[in-house]
Image (spheres, grey):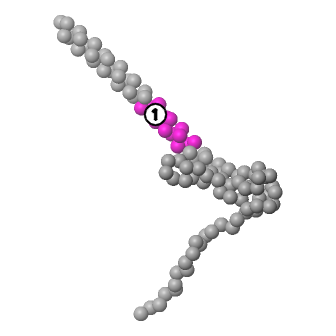
Amino acid sequence: MKVGDRQQQGRGGAKAKMICPKCGKEYLESAGGKKGKSWKRIGQYCPNPACDYIIKDFVELEEEAAEDTDKADKIKKLTAEFVKTHEKLNELAELIDELEKE
């Protein structure tokens, strides 16, 4: 029987805490919010009431903005297709009315 290395237990890869560069008194805490049922990290802030230091995660914010613009573009395209299809249906309805009159 071959004995292998034991796996280490623990968090592994935990990031070191940063001290606020503005006041130097407190560790920065994660800021986030809920979108639906999931929690999303949006940056870090200093919990000291006298300090107003904030770091925003612009990468995540830009990704959300890109998703929103993709959705908006998709809605515009689908709306345009809907209008074209509706116009075709109106033309066909007019043709049917003309044929029924004859």
From what the image shows, is residue 84 above or below residue 65?
above
Which image quarter: residue 1?
bottom left
The span shown in magenta is 65-78
Residue 99 percent across, percent down from the top left: 20, 11
Name the magenta segment's main secondary structure. Answer: helix
Query: What crowding class fits label 1: few (fewer than 14 Cα within 10 Å), some (14-19), or many (20 or more)?
Result: few
Report the front residue among 26 and 9: 26
Magenta stretch encompasses residue 70: yes
Residue 60 percent across, percent down from the top left: 60, 50
Residue shown at the point (47%, 31%) measured from the top left: 76
Residue shown at the point (51%, 39%) measured from the top left: 70
Residue placed under numbered mark 1 in the picture: 75
Residue 46 percent across, percent down from the top left: 73, 55
From what the image shows, is residue 53 above or below residue 90?
below
Report the front residue among 24 and 61: 24
Q: Secondary structure at mark 1?
A: helix
From what the image shows, is residue 84 above or below residue 95?
below
Which image quarter: residue 30?
bottom right
Quadrant position of the C terminus in the picture:
top left
